[in-house]
Image (tube, coloured by chain):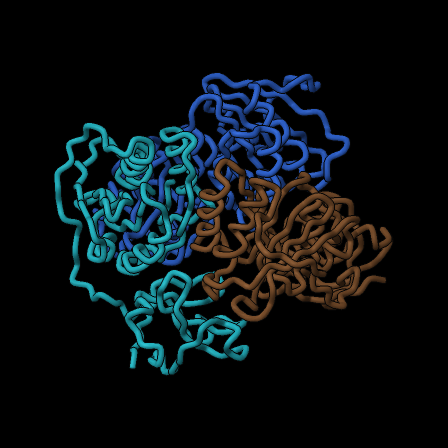
Chain colours: A blue, B cyan, C brown
């Protein structure tokens, strides 16, 4: 299975162009779009989502991961193999948290492309490699060199919002298992206590809970947390 | 064919997570997203869209239907078999109009899940069942009990907007066959007469017409009805 | 491969309804959505995108192209075969630039449909024909007549924005090969010089560049050109 994890959007041409390459070079292999609306340019936010949302996919899945403000510049591309899954994308920190948490991890730096468009490596560099990995489980004969994925000095748990979903719920970069159930979250002057799920709270009340992928999520029963609490990707919070 | 009818959005991550389950458990079966932008939490609006838009799908199609403000609470899940198609989802009224209009209908209540995430039954409870139905046409050995789908006391024709499309057209919960061609629709102080299609009206003129799925739809030729008439999902109208 | 090029949106319901027809009538053939968010009703803008973005698809690809403000009216439907690819859609100018630039082009006018919905020819007229072309490479026995695609008197290079992408970049209707590298673009009082790619410019600086499909694109490194320059689909510019 090929999994897309990008900030491309679906409607506009980039995801479709990548899918066309994948279909031609890995025919018959399913392509799932997991995220197409990661916050543009925000590598750190995406880095904390990736391990939480990749965990549910079977071994052998190949992830095409692109949040790539540095496309066309000096940043290298990388292939990461972590706990039996493959990840391909630009190496500016996107794989840092994944690599830190993995039991087994291996990173290979890709050679600089000579003929690719300087603005669309996903289509011209990463997708062909993803297709080959999905098809053969191998890189082919390309000259790759062993490397460490970029490892910024980011915290183990990020106390920030990393994604706002369609309902206005705010997913954070903090694992619920790292927070005690009795903890209070303070965000933008609001103090939130924990609930098991939406219907345990009155309509219109904000709370936090362990979402279905194990992250702390801030929500409002039958309401939009983003508007009610005036929060967005990047908004920080405190745990006490 | 598996058909998705949800308020999840496509771009991230819920539809992709559901598709990953379906792909693994029903490989090779096509998954079509019919609606991913149903109005959040608005079960009634979705209930009037479902029979109109399901009618075009072939017998044996399996619909995963989720507008589920009560997820994790007491509401049961249900499987509905109506006129040769299957529907799976939360039973809070979403299938009420479908069941009322079907010639043959059978409902089975699902057992309460023991291990599912309390916030994502679509992925953990409904998708595996949808996959099994699409694959085998059966439930397996699960302990299901015969039941009636929830049947709120809703009117046969809902005189409200139930969906705004990408063009700003307003689809309503009223079947065109239930309204005479000479009828006037009054909405937000505007009186609208019927046209056959867009190009029969001058640019910028609002009208109503029988849309391609048989519902009354309010539109403006080369304009946006939602903005021009200040209407949204839930806006009521009168027929005279 | 079937390619969708429309202003339908993906989330609901039109693309899904078209995909359902394609899946039933051309099972097993991949369907890629290239654009689903073309500017509504703007045939000219779409006409300049089509040849640039179709060029990357393999021979035999069949494009379903719909920007169709005249649906249900007098405008004919058409099949265009250009340089080994097929295109099907309403003939109001959408194929004009494609046909002008093709080395080999053939156009066939479709008969007026008798039973189709007057508002959804994409589902009822074009999709069945697209499926047949993708399956058999033929039209079947339908009575088609040779014709020229509509050819408005549009310029070879359109000096207007034709699409705003998810990042706020503005794709134009001008081929980069038609502009010298030293040229300055003037748009809304801003003078923009050329760069190779994003990272060659300081953050926040607007520039133009040759995008990955050969069109002039206006962008801001780590910013949104649409907001910073106050531009939208249709905004004109000058080249000097």
Of C77 and B64, which appears nearest the observer? C77
Classify residue B21 as left or right of residue C105. Answer: left
Query: Which residue occupies the foreground of this view, A49 or A30?
Result: A30
Q: Quadrant of the C terminus of chain B?
A: bottom left
- Residue C151 picture quarter: bottom right
Res A40 seen here: no
Residue found 50% across the figure and 72% down from its top? B198
Q: Residue at x 30, y 78 (%)?
A: B239
Q: Position of residue B225 (x, y in %)?
A: 45, 72
Q: Is residue B160 above or below residue A42?
A: below
Percent position of residue A46, x then y: 51, 38
**Figure quadrant of the N terminus of chain B:** top left
Is residue C186 placed above or below C194 in the rendered structure? below
Q: Is residue C66 left or right of residue C216?
A: left
Residue at x 37%, y 48% (from the top left corner):
B57
The residue positioned 42% from the left and 28% from the top of the image is: A57
Image height check: is C186 above or below A136?
A: below
| Left or right: A50 as drawn, with respect to A88 | left
Residue nearest the viewer, comparing C125 with C239: C125
x and y, in percent, of residue A161 in the image: 44, 45
Percent across and percent down for residue C143 are 59, 56
Towards the viewer: A192 or A89:
A89
Is residue A89 shown to the viewer in this render?
yes
Q: Is residue C214 left or right of residue C15?
A: right
Q: Is residue B26 above or below residue C47?
A: above
């Amino acid at each position: 299975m090929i999994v897309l994890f990008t900030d491309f959007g679906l409607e506009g041409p980039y995801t479709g162009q990548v899918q066309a390459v994948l279909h031609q070079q890995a025919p018959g292999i399913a392509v799932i779009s997991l995220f197409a609306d990661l916050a543009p340019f925000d590598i750190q936010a995406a880095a904390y989502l990736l391990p939480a949302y990749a965990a549910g996919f079977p071994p052998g899945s190949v992830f095409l991961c692109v949040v790539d403000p540095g496309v066309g510049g000096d940043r290298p591309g990388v292939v990461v193999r972590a706990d039996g899954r493959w990840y391909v994308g630009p190496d500016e920190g996107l794989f840092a948290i994944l690599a830190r948490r993995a039991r087994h991890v291996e990173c290979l730096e890709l050679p600089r492309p000579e003929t690719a468009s300087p603005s669309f490596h996903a289509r011209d560099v990463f997708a062909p490699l993803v297709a080959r990995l999905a098809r053969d489980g191998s890189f082919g004969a390309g000259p790759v060199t062993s490397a460490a994925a970029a490892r910024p000095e980011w915290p183990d748990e990020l106390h920030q919002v990393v994604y706002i979903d369609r309902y206005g719920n705010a997913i954070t970069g903090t694992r619920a298992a790292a927070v005690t159930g009795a903890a209070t979250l303070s965000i933008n002057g609001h103090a939130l206590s924990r609930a098991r799920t939406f219907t345990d709270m009155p309509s219109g009340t904000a709370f936090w809970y362990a979402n279905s992928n194990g992250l702390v999520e801030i929500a409002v029963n039958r309401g939009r947390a983003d508007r009610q609490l005036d929060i967005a990707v990047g908004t920080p919070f405190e745990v006490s």
